[in-house]
Amino acid sequence: MNRKIRAFSVLEAMMAMLIVMIAFGLSSSIFINVSTSGFSPRKKKAHTLVNRMRYETLTQQRFIEESREFDGITIEKTISDYDGSSALKVLSVVAKSQDKTLFGTREIILINTLEP
């Protein structure tokens, strides 16, 4: 019963705890950054609505300015000249919430089909 058991010293135990705490802190900060950087369901819906409005405009060749509202999200479509050229147009579709926060936008340069 006189045998000594090898054990960690207090200094080694403190260093091990410090390493574990640093690893835990880094992993939790990475987890928080990843979880907050994603799209919210409302942003995903706005992105889907912008793409649908863009697709309908291109397939139906409906090149007029209009605004629609879906579940509190306003989709605004505008047609403007591209750098002063009447031969090219820019289609801009913007999704906004009621507090004017921009959710998504899509701009496409179109060949002018408004004039013959």
Image (cartoon, rainbow, N blue to C red):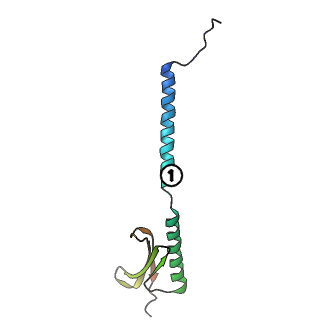
Q: Let me know if residue 95 appears in the view.
A: yes
Q: Position of residue 9 (x, y in %)?
A: 51, 18
Residue extending farthest to the left is: 84
Q: Where is residue 96 in the image (x, y as percent from the top left)?
A: 43, 72
Residue extending farthest to the top is: 2
Q: Where is residue 50 in the image (x, y as percent from the top left)?
A: 49, 74
Q: Is mark 1 on a helix, strand or loop?
A: helix
Residue, disc 1: 34
Report the residue at 39% width, 69% height from top.
99
Give the camera-side residue of 61 and 49. 49
Circle count: 1
Residue extending farthest to the right is: 1
Screen quadrant of the N terminus: top right
Report the residue at 49% width, 34% height from top.
21
Label 1 Cα crowd, 10 Å radius (few <14 / some 14-19 / many 20+): few
Q: Is residue 11 above or below residue 115?
A: above
Give the camera-side residue of 24 and 1. 1
Q: In this view, does 19 lie above or below 100?
A: above
Q: Position of residue 45 (x, y in %)?
A: 52, 69
> What amino acid is found at the position of numbered circle 1 in the picture?
Val
Q: Let me know if residue 107 appears in the view.
A: no
Find residue 115 and report its image quarter: bottom left
Report the residue at 48% width, 54% height from top.
36
Screen quadrant of the C terminus: bottom left
Q: In this view, does 48 lie above or below 116?
A: above
